[in-house]
Each structure stands twice: as structure tokens, then as C-alpha cells.
Amino acid sequence: MHHLYSALGETRLQKLLTAGLLAFIASFMLLPTSKMVNNVFYALMALPALFALIGGHCRKLEISRVFWLWGLLMLWLIYVGIESGDAQFFKHILYVCLFMLAVGQLIAPKIFLDSDFTRSLFWSVLIYMGGSSIYYWIIGEYAFGEKVLWLPGRMTGPIYSSIWLSCCFALNLPSWIRQGAWKELIAGLLFTLFIAAFALQSRSGLVGLFVLSFMAIIYLASTHPQTRRFLSVGGLLMAGCALWAYSEIPQIHALVARGDSARFEIWAALMNEWRDCGLMQGCGMEHKSDVILTGGGGILHPHSIYLSLGVFAGLPALLTFCLLMSLTMYIAWKNRNPWGLYLLSGMIGLAFDGSFLVGNPDELWLLILLPAALIIHPGSRTPQTHTNT
């Protein structure tokens, strides 16, 4: 207990905010409504960070260039919001700024870099999603093999849930490989595939999972030549299992049969609207597309975090965000920070299903803001890399 308490930080503020962040992450699984999760953020993170800012506790912080770049992005969004947003939008910008300040500067990041924590997070998320799916099948809420549309917690939809599970798997790849925990790695991969492909039946998380798994195979083959034969046999077995599953399991076949789910049509229509509005400023925060798709439905959201930024906030917002993600990934690679793989998996999945980055605390905070802030935290850097990057 004393070890856990000391891991929360040195100062009272650090302990409060670090514990608040742990509670915030857990609330997406334990609390059923967005209002409850929002209240956790307000009480345990936003207010302490705001008081720290007002009270002058931030004067001696080490502010990196990447952190200032986040400020530049927020300033641009404020400018766009003045032209086209409502008062709620500026409140959401404040929330994002306070979250980035708390996680990127004020917490104690050590606990989030501990492999025991990252493994616990992965298995907790997996048990939440897998256990909820099995429970719903047992009580008849969904028939066995039917897509589980709503999980019981705030992390409820299959798309973001599968991406989060993929991110948590990616987060643990380095420690599993480094420690030779092959049984745990394979078990985690198989359970993740089952939940994402069979229970949630979402392709967005699978894309990130496949990309990160391929990267891990390339890394192992190049750094551990003795594993190449094993990897070749394992790759052939997985390919064979995938072909069998596609031909024999209707749920897996349906994942491929759905095609692009009109995404290309949506993206083309929104790109045309963005061009008509003006590439630099976009269409504004209140933009609603009136395009009717071939299937008869309308466009609810852009299905891409990148296109969302461009359409609503213009090219400067999109380019600044892409630069931010590139610099953050570079910092993660330089420091061998596993949260870089978590962030990469989230960026891949949200390229096909993301919405706008700024809003009330939601799934994008876990998938993008959380890892990005942890990576740029000064305490997450290795000693030789304490520069002003």
C-alpha cells in the first residue's frame, strides 16, 4: 500500500491528479453514463488543475515545444470557434487544455510506465469487454454470435471499444517481447481477436491490431534471427486460420462483406464541402452536411479524426495536429515509451472512425489525448533526452 501511495507522486497535487487520472480511466468501464464520467473528470482532474494554474503552481514547469504546439492548436480552434461556434465549444477547449495540463505536466507518470500497470490495464479492459459480451449472450440480451452493440460502461460502442482494446494490446507488446512472455502475448492476441472480430465485430480495432502485430513480427525477425522459422510457421498458421474463419464463420465473413460501409462516399462528399467552404478555415464547428448517400441515409460524422479537423477547423488545424502527432511519436520512439504504440494504434483506428477531437470527456480522450500527454510529460523522458523538444 505504501509503495502504491508513493507511486502516485511526491506532492499532494501530484498524488491527487495521478489518482484522479486512474479513476478517470477506470470510470469508462465502471460508470454507465457520460455525465458520471464527466463528473469524475471535473472533480478529480479539472478543478485541481485549474486551482494549480490559478495558484501559481505551474510557474516552474518545464514546458516543451510540443506542449506549446498544443497551445497553438487550441488558439486556432478558438479563432475558428469565434467565427462559427457556440459558447459550449469554448468550454470544451478549456476542458481539453486542463486535461493536457494535468496529464502532460502535473501528474506523476511513473506508474503509467510500469509494466504491471499496463498489463493490468489490458486485462481489465479485455475482461470488461469479453465478460460483458458473455454475460449478454447468457441472459439473452444478444444471441450468441450477434454483434454486441452496447457495453454496460461509458466505453460502450463496438468501434471505440475495439480500438481501445487494440491500443492496450499494443501498449504491452514491448514488455511482453522484452521479458519473453510469449504465452501471455499469444493469449492476449487470441482473446483480442475473438472480442474484436466475433463479439464486437468491429474492423477499426482490427486494423490497428494487424498493423502493430506486423510491425512486431518484422522487429522480431530482424533482431532475433532464431525466431524467423517460428514466425514463418506461426504466420502461415494464422493466415490459414483467417481463411478458414472467413469461409466458415458468418460473423467473420460479414466483416469483409461490409466493404467500406460507404466511407469513401462520405469522405468524397465531405472533401467537396470542405473545398467549397474554403480549405484554410473549413466549414465551421456548426457545420451539418445535407448530402444524402446512395443508401438513402445522411452523414452523421466524417468517420475520420483527420477529416473532422479539416472539415470543421480547416487545413491549419489538420496540419498542426499531424505535426503534433509526428513529434509525439518521435519523442516516444526516442524514449522507448510504449505509449507511442498505444497512440499509433489509436491513430490508425481513428483514421477510419474518429470524430472531432475537442468535446466533453469521451473515448477520443483515452485514445489520443491520454497517450499524447503521457509521452510529452517531462517525467516520461529518459535522462539523456531531457531537451526542449
Image (spheres, helix red, strand yellow):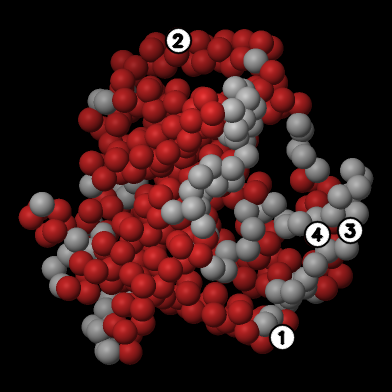
**Label disc, if present, on residue 270 of the rendered structure:** 4
Q: Amino acid at mark 1?
A: Glu
Nearer to us of marks 3 and 4 is 3
- Furthest residue in direction left, as rendered: 2
**Residues at marks 1 and 3, CA–CA distance in whole angstroms:** 23 Å
Crowd around label 1: few <14 · some 14–19 · many ≥20 (10 Å): few
Residue 149 visible here? yes
Secondary structure beneath dot 2 equals helix
Task: Quickly name the residue at label 3.
Answer: 291
Please tell me which residue is depicted at 74% across the width and 74% down the height of the picture: 286
Instruction: Of the two numbered discs 4 and 1 on the same chain, state the one appearing first in sequence.
Output: 1
Please tell me which residue is depicted at 31% across the width and 64% down the height of the picture: 20
Please tell me which residue is depicted at 72% across the width and 25% down the height of the picture: 254
Instruction: Of the two numbered discs 3 and 2 on the same chain, state the one appearing first in sequence.
Output: 2
Q: Amino acid at mark 2?
A: Val
Pointer 4 and pointer 2: residues touching (CB < 8 Å)?
A: no
Crowd around label 2: few <14 · some 14–19 · many ≥20 (10 Å): few
Nearer to us of marks 3 and 2 is 3
Q: Amino acid at mark 3?
A: Val
**Residues at marks 4 and 2, CA–CA distance in whole angstroms:** 44 Å
Placement of 272 over or under 73, stated as above or below:
above
Task: Quickly name the residue at label 1.
Answer: 83
Q: Which of the 4 quarters of the picture holds residue 301?
A: bottom right
In this picture, residue 12 sits left or right of residue 37? left
Secondary structure beneath dot 1 equals helix
Placement of 169 over or under 220, stated as above or below:
below
